[in-house]
Image (cartoon, rainbow, N blue to C red):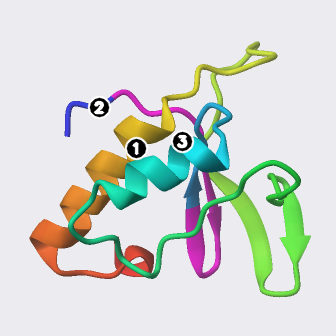
Amino acid sequence: RGMRLGPVVAAPHRWAILVKPYSMEQLGELLYAKDFVPGSLRFHGEGGYLALPPSTTGQGEVHWERAPLPGSASPWLPDVEAVVDAVVEALTRTGVSAPEL
């Protein structure tokens, strides 16, 4: 709530909130500091990939739930820490799993 979001990719069974590049060390420290991290969360680091819209995968169409701003060659992206904090707090508070959020 009240957080500035960047682009969000929607696939049939999962959404992806795009963030600035981060290191696995940074992510590990961030997750270690949490009391609880839902197992349904997925992270893509260096060498990982994500289908971007418009695409079709074996599970269906991939589209923008929140597209990058028009004319933006490199869109603004939030820091991984802000997104992980907000998502973990929302999932912990509501008791839903990530695919339901």
For mark 3, does the 10 Å Cα neighbourhood hold few (<14), some (14 to 19), or many (20 or more) residues? Answer: few
CA distance for labels 2 and 3: 21 Å
For mark 1, does the 10 Å Cα neighbourhood hold few (<14), some (14 to 19), or many (20 or more) residues? Answer: some
CA distance for labels 2 and 1: 9 Å
Q: Nearer the viewer, residue 32 or 100?
A: 32
Query: What kind of element bears circle 1?
Result: helix
If you read the primary sequence from the N terminus, does the residue marked by circle 1 or circle 3 appear first? 3
Q: Is residue 17 visible?
A: yes
Q: Which residue is mark 3?
A: 26
Q: Quadrant of the C terminus?
A: bottom left
Disc sitting over residue 3 in the figure:
2
Q: Nearer the viewer, residue 47 or 62?
A: 47
If you read the primary sequence from the N terminus, does the residue marked by circle 2 or circle 1 appear first? 2
**Is mark 1 in CB contact (under 8 Å) with mark 3?**
no
Position in image of residue 77 (x %, y %): 57, 27
Tell me the kind of residue under disc 1.
Val
Q: Which residue is mark 1?
A: 83
Disc sitting over residue 57 in the figure:
none
Above or below residue 69? Residue 52 is below
Q: Residue at x 59, y 46 (%)?
A: 25
Q: Which residues are magenta?
A: 4-15
Q: Is residue 65 visible?
A: no
Total labels: the figure holds 3
Q: Residue at x 73, y 52 (%)?
A: 45
State the image quarter where residue 9 is shown.
bottom right
